[in-house]
Amino acid sequence: MTEIIDLDRIKAVLKFIDPIQSIEKGFVAYSKGKAVTPPVGEMIFEDPPGEAHIKYGYLKGDDFYVIKIASGFYENPKIGLPTSTGLMLLFSQKTGEVLCILLDQGHLTDVRTAAAGAVAAKYLGPKDVHKIGIFGAGIQGRIQLKFLKSITKCRQVMVWGINQQELGSYKNDMEPLDFNIQTTMEPGDIASSCNLIVTCTPSKKPLLQAKQIRKGTHITAMGSDIPEKQELDSDILKKADKVVVDSISQVQERGESFHAMEDGAINKDDLKELGTVIENKEFQRSSEDEITVTDLTGIAVQDLQISKAVWEVIRKQKEKES
Amino acid sequence: MTEIIDLDRIKAVLKFIDPIQSIEKGFVAYSKGKAVTPPVGEMIFEDPPGEAHIKYGYLKGDDFYVIKIASGFYENPKIGLPTSTGLMLLFSQKTGEVLCILLDQGHLTDVRTAAAGAVAAKYLGPKDVHKIGIFGAGIQGRIQLKFLKSITKCRQVMVWGINQQELGSYKNDMEPLDFNIQTTMEPGDIASSCNLIVTCTPSKKPLLQAKQIRKGTHITAMGSDIPEKQELDSDILKKADKVVVDSISQVQERGESFHAMEDGAINKDDLKELGTVIENKEFQRSSEDEITVTDLTGIAVQDLQISKAVWEVIRKQKEKES
């Protein structure tokens, strides 16, 4: 029988899960060529403007496959609805049965994205983080910071946003979680004071320039999920000692690396995949002076891993009940 | 809030629906170019062998979009599970919200396929049907016959199958529905006695030859959903006065017309779409002597129309309740 899991239950189940570990395993499997992730399905609507994407895939030899549907309807806020929504469906790779439908309204995408940021910080971030810099005072800016808690002991944070209202709201939400939050609307403030930086904005022009980036800084960029978006000047990737991406094939079309390759600042050969980095110490940060960049565009294996992790808890809860 | 509709409720709701009318409207909209149906998503599994397909689409200016997931796992019967299963998801084209999830286990695909057969018989079948011929004594062979009840008064039926057991079971199931069922394992018996024929088998070589087909016969062929399958000899389509297909673009790759075009028996110009035929009397059957063939490969608009029809009833039931 198919289990239907609503958002409240998903949030309750997430307390029993370590998404960072699941996502880390997913990246490794992906970079070992074990993942099958066909091209994304897409529908574009005109009136009102909106889009829906279907991401799907599986690991060879695994028990599951996942189909994720995500949509963005940009006029939704006018009628009091969030712009983005979606759901994930987890199927048996042995029988085709739909095991569970996760009505997560996009929350698990937020979680798996933030977990990827934590994985990047774990293998590429400086050991001694003196201040965390967050670009983007929205949902992802919040959840990224929460996930960094288990990676670094640093609780000093500077957040960049586009107005005082969202920055105030961010500070109010995050300080009770033991962070000391400073706010700014000036990107240079973060570059000059933070050595672990996460960018999660929908920016279409670079927020940071190469000359601002100091020795020893790690930047994880995850806002650029479509070709039109860019958060980092291409020269930052040129200046970096290491540039790590989630998927070399996917950054041929989107992400910071895509722009940097288009601009001739870096070549495909300069890139390593995060899954490869996790498995090979020599590709991880090797000194506190290095500048490192991780460029995350989001891959279906992350959706697979997070939905499997949720399902695993629910399956065990069911077994206990029966 | 998303409504989750299980198979029992879907079957109950179907009693309030006229799928033939919904599907007819869908074909017309499709042939007028109002449908957007992107390429089918596909995953192929090796151990055990299985496949999953994702069909999706919408009508421009409509309120909905649909995503259908269908799978076939060929070793399922060994563990007591049906080979095929699936579900349909209906979304709002205005907000992206998932309105309902139809856990139909493939039943709505059977229904929309049979409804298409009825539409074909309505516009292309002879007025005076003296005997209905059904190739295939499975689920689709049963449901096709049920749907023909509202199209013709004829209750004389001959069914072809591959063994006496399945034929006996078919007869037992269908005679209580007021049909007089003869059975045969000889295709020629149907060709020589029936003037409204429906083929719904997974055959990979033609069951009927051109010389067997008599004046005034209509054949609806719907078994051939992948390029490898073929139920009618190509010369039958050459001999026919009218060859009507659900989708001219789709039969470039599958269906009886695909094989007949490959064999040089007919050209693309010989084909009319069912949606065009419904709207234009001159393309419908014009005499009791004509031989007509309808080649149905199955299009996403049918999935959209049937799930919309189910949702419409459920929405009204909900309104009454509240």
Image (cartoon, coloured by chain):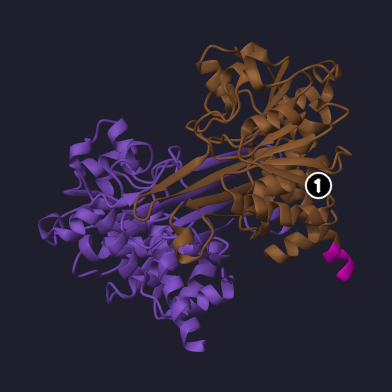
Chain colours: A brown, B purple
User: Could you tell me the amino acid type at mark 1?
Assistant: Asn
Q: Is residue A304 visible?
A: no
The residue pinned by badge 1 equals A180
B130 shown above or below A302 = below
Q: Tag 1, which chain?
A: A
Query: Residue A117: percent from the left, percent from the top?
Result: 73, 37
Query: Residue B263: percent from the left, percent from the top?
Result: 30, 31
At 48% from the left and 71% from the top, the residue drawn is B171
B322 shown above or below B88 = below
At 57% from the left and 43% from the top, the residue drawn is A55
At 41% from the left and 43% from the top, the residue drawn is B38
Query: Residue B77: percent from the left, percent from the top?
Result: 67, 55
Magenta stretch? A317-322
Q: Taking A1 as reference, is B20 left or right?
A: left
Residue nearest the viewer, comparing B310 with B295: B310
Query: Residue A188: percent from the left, percent from the top?
Result: 64, 29
At 21% from the left and 63% from the top, the residue drawn is B123
Q: Taking B166 as reference, is B211 left or right?
A: left
